[in-house]
Each structure stands twice: as structure tokens, then as C-alpha cells.
Image (tube, rainbow, N blue to C red):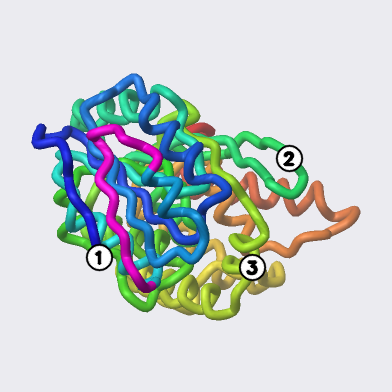
Amino acid sequence: MTGKIISSEEPIVSVLMPAYNAEKHIAHAIESILLQSFTNFELIVLNDGSTDETSQIIDQFKDVRICKVDLSHNQGLVKARNQLVGMARGRYIAFLDSDDIAMPNRLQVQVDFLESGKADICGGAHYSLYETSGKLKLSKQRYSDPDIRALITVCSPLCNPAVMGRAEVFKKHPYQTGKDYAEDYSLWAELALAGYCFANLKERLITYRIHASQISQAQNPGAKLIFSQSRMEYLEGLGISREYCPRPLTLLKRLQYAIPFMLKLNQKIRRVSVGANYEIYGRFQFRGNGVLTPLVRLERFLVSVLVSIKGGSLSIRA
């Protein structure tokens, strides 16, 4: 392993970038950080045993804010992320993967928000770039802490490479080994149960590339099992039995399990928006309902309004 920090100035932000066989995109990712309007950062790039030209491309950048770490053998993403966190000197840690692109004001916007003390960890809206088709889509986010905590019961509501948070949080709670391909979701669930405060910013912070390898990883049975296990642990941490876990159910079963789950969730997490409750309750319903679709949507809306009232919020927005 090789690595050195050239600058002795204490940075405010440590930007962490793991890379493995990333020759196609890593130059754009690094450039997007070096062009940030906020300049008091260090960029630590960990070349995790790449067998392509990744190392040589990183070497082309001479900015003193870059620290390069070269590993001779691939250790895997979870270990790479934890090693980067351990090296970080900044007050805040920001993530960016080697195939994504940060918007020029990304660091400034997140530092300003975190300095206000409104959250411990913040993500943000982003563009999703589908590499095979070239299509660019706008993300659909929920922004408040209650909505993010509630949505962890069904999905990962933070985009990992758009996240910035207080460094001590990530140093105290490392990514969990054995949670590969769901390591970010598992961490958000752990941090939520530990009482940390989340937020998503409405500004679009990054362009997030989606390509075939990511899709295959997400569909991997092992990754799905890890996600399911972490979700069950989160539900139990909230004091909700596993039998209420969101999954498609018939109408009678929804009355038995889904509505009690929604009520319990909104008692545990106050002020969840109608919109977030609408998303969560939809996981209990089947898709492709044909002519019954309007009635299914009406059911979802009415349940969402009811549980939001019980939870002390009538907001339709995050």
C-alpha cells in the first residue's frame, strides 16, 4: 500500500473516493471535486487493487489536496470505505464514487447546511444517468428527518455518493463487514436507531451513473438477503414485530397487518408526511390492479392521511 497527504492544512471536508477498475469515469469524478466552489477539502482516492489504468489516471492529477492510496490487492468496497473513513482528517466526510460527478457547488451547499446544526447526515437530490440509454432522470426524494427514518422500512432513502456528514459519526459507526451491496442501507438503519438526524437537500448535488454492473449487484440474491436482514433489524429496533414487514398482501391481510404497521410506525416516528406514508403503504399493495387501480390508490391515500393525522402531521410534502 502506498499513500501520502501532501498538504498539511487541516481540511474542513474529507471527500472519500474508492476506485476499482474505474478507468472509464474516474477522471471526470476527480475533476468534479477539484472544480468545487468550496476549496478547503482533501480528496482521498483509494485505488483498490485495480487491474486497468485507474492508478495511472489518478497519477495525472497533481493537486496538493489529493491523497492517493494504492492497494496491490482488491479488498472489497466495505473495507475500502472504512479505510478511507479512518484516514479522513476533515470535520465532515463527503462520499463520491469514482463513476459519479459532483455539481460545482455541492460541497459548499452541504457544509453550509451542516454548519447550521440541523442534521448530522445530509444527502440530496440528484440526477440519475442511465449509461446504456443516455437518459437523465431527476431523483424523487423525501427531505425531512421523519420521512427518511420512516422510508428506511422499505428502501434506502439516501443516495450514498451524495452524502456528507459529521466525521465522528462515520468513525464511530463504520460500514458493516458482510453487508456488501447493501452496506449503505445497513448503515442508515444503524444510524437512525442510534438517534442521528438526517436530511436530504432539495438542491441536486451529483450525477449518479447507473450501469449494468450496479443493476446486477442490486438484483443479486445475496444483496437482497442482506437488505432484508437489515430491514428486519431496523423494524425490531423500532419495536415493530417482523410479522408486520411491508410486502404485498391481499385486502383482508392489509387490514390485519398493513394498517396496524402504519399506525405503529407513525407512533414511533412522529410527523411523517402523507407523501412518505403513501409510498410506504404502496409496498403492501399489489401492482397491476387493472380497473381496480383507482380504488387501490384511493385506499392508499385515505390510509396515508389517517396515519399522518395520528402521527401529528397533515403535510403532503416532506
Residue 264 highlighted magenta (yes or no): no
In the rendered view, does 234 fall on the left or right side of 136?
Answer: left
Amino acid carrying mark 1 in the image: Met
Total label count?
3
Amino acid carrying mark 2 in the image: Gly
Q: What element carries label 3?
A: helix
Precedes in sequence: disc 3 or disc 2: 2
Residue at the spot 31% in from the left edge and 35% down from the top edge: 62
Q: Is mark 2 on a helix, strand or loop?
A: loop
Precedes in sequence: disc 1 or disc 3: 1
Q: Where is residue 107 in the image (x, y as percent from the top left)?
A: 33, 29
Quarter residue 229 falls in: bottom left
User: Looking at the rendered structure, which numbered label has been put on residue 134?
Assistant: 2
Amino acid carrying mark 3 in the image: Ser
Of 25 and 266, nearer the camera is 25
Q: Position of residue 134 (x, y in %)?
A: 73, 40
Q: Position of residue 204 (x, y in %)?
A: 49, 29
Precedes in sequence: disc 2 or disc 1: 1
In the rendered view, does 67 fall on the left or right side of 290?
Answer: left
In the rendered view, does 167 fall on the left or right side of 45?
Answer: left
Quarter residue 135 falls in: top right
- How much space separates mark 1 and mark 3, taking CA atoms? 30 Å
Residue at the extreme top: 37
Which residue position is annotated with label 1? 1
Residue at the spot 59% in from the left edge and 56% down from the top edge: 281
User: Looking at the rendered structure, which numbered label has been put on residue 216?
Assistant: 3
- Region rendered in magenta: 60-73
